[in-house]
Amino acid sequence: MSIGEHNDVISQTVNKMGMCILNRPKALNSLSFSMMRKLHPQLLKWENDPAISFVVLKGAGKAFCAGGDIKALTQTPEGINFFKEEYPLDYTIGTYKKPFISLITGITMGGGFGLSVHGKYRVASEKTMFAMPETSIGLVPDVGGGYVLPRLQGKLGIYLGLTGFRLKGRDVHLAGIATHFVDSNKVSTLEEELAALDNPDHNNIQNLLDQFHKESTKESHEFILEPKMEDINRSFSATTVEQIFTNLEKDGSEWALKQLETLKKMSPTSMKITLRQLKEGANLSLKECFYMENRLCQRCIEDHDLREGVRAVLIDKDQNPQWKPARLEDVTDERVDYYFSKLPDDRELVMQD
């Protein structure tokens, strides 16, 4: 066990509330094997403990969770098994029998999305920053992104999954990622009042969250992408990434050309896999999406682009990844099919209901 791993997840109970705190603030609470191996059994224990009525998950410092520890994942032999441990944890949250509240009141990306969005309640604040930036490092928006993103309004999920666009504050709620918005200076009071509930069932928890949300959203706020939703729906409704590029080129507006510039920086392979992932995920169950995404991410670990993306963005930080293939037209349908193909039995995902 590395220094600091012994307290990278802090679990505590207050009255009928179980609380887990992700406690790697210097690493923006990036999710590690050590954290998953503490968090998952604790959640299962509380789910079956009659003394615990609901669970709260939050992060220490300025992040909820900035994602999986991708650098470690690509640099250790054990990395190939990361997703096989991460997805069952996320699925436990998605099927939790008790109210599950994630306080995503800080940076929430990638793996942090998986730890929160499948739960019953997700509370954002003005300090929340949400994104799924996986195509910029040669990965795909996994952790159930294939289930959640296609179910957002219009083609918003495809737009977010391909571009990695960052949503902040109230826009995280308006997009449908968070269920509630609470001012950051009221979050600690919310925690105290949740812990003090005499009968913390779904109704009473919902009512308390609604009350805090109402107090924090008295002033109207237009969703930041609302003025562009018609453009997003038109350009990102295409069946291929090439057609999305063509749509944006034909649009020709400053906004469209900016999106095109962003997409041209992403891994061509990742974008093609992501578009298919989100289209297929729209018709799959959450569990089926996890099975699909395990295959996609394990293939990514074997491939060039993820290692190169991690090098360019997280290690050397030159922000200049050399993708292979470098052109969309060189990513064949057969290559994309390979990512979705069956893995050897010992690498396929196994999950219990």
Image: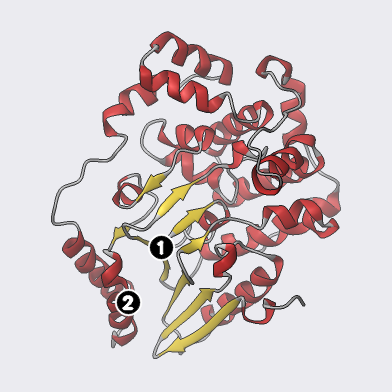
Q: Residue at x 82, y 59 (%)?
A: 78
Q: Residue at x 48, y 56 (%)?
A: 108
Residue 90, compared with residue 55, is above or below; it is: above
Crowd band around label 1 with a 10 angstrom C-alpha radius: few (<14), some (14–19), many (20+): many
Label 1 sits on what residue type?
Answer: Lys
Task: Specify the quadrant of the image occupied by residue 327.
Answer: top right
Q: Quick one: 79 or 292, which is closer to the camera?
A: 79
Front position in the image: 193 or 134:
134
- Across and down, in percent, residue 258 comes to 44, 23
- Is tag 1's residue or tag 2's residue first in the polypeptide sequence? 1
Q: Is residue 2 above or below residue 317?
A: below
Q: Is residue 349 visible?
A: no
Please state if 240 lies on the left or on the right of 34 as rendered: left
Q: Where residue 159 sits: x, y (%)? A: 46, 32
Figure quadrant of the C terminus: bottom right
**Coordinates of residue 109 in the picture (x, y in percent):** 52, 52
Residue tagged by mark 1? 120
Q: Give the numbered dot on residue 188.
A: 2
Q: Position of residue 351 (x, y in %)?
A: 68, 60
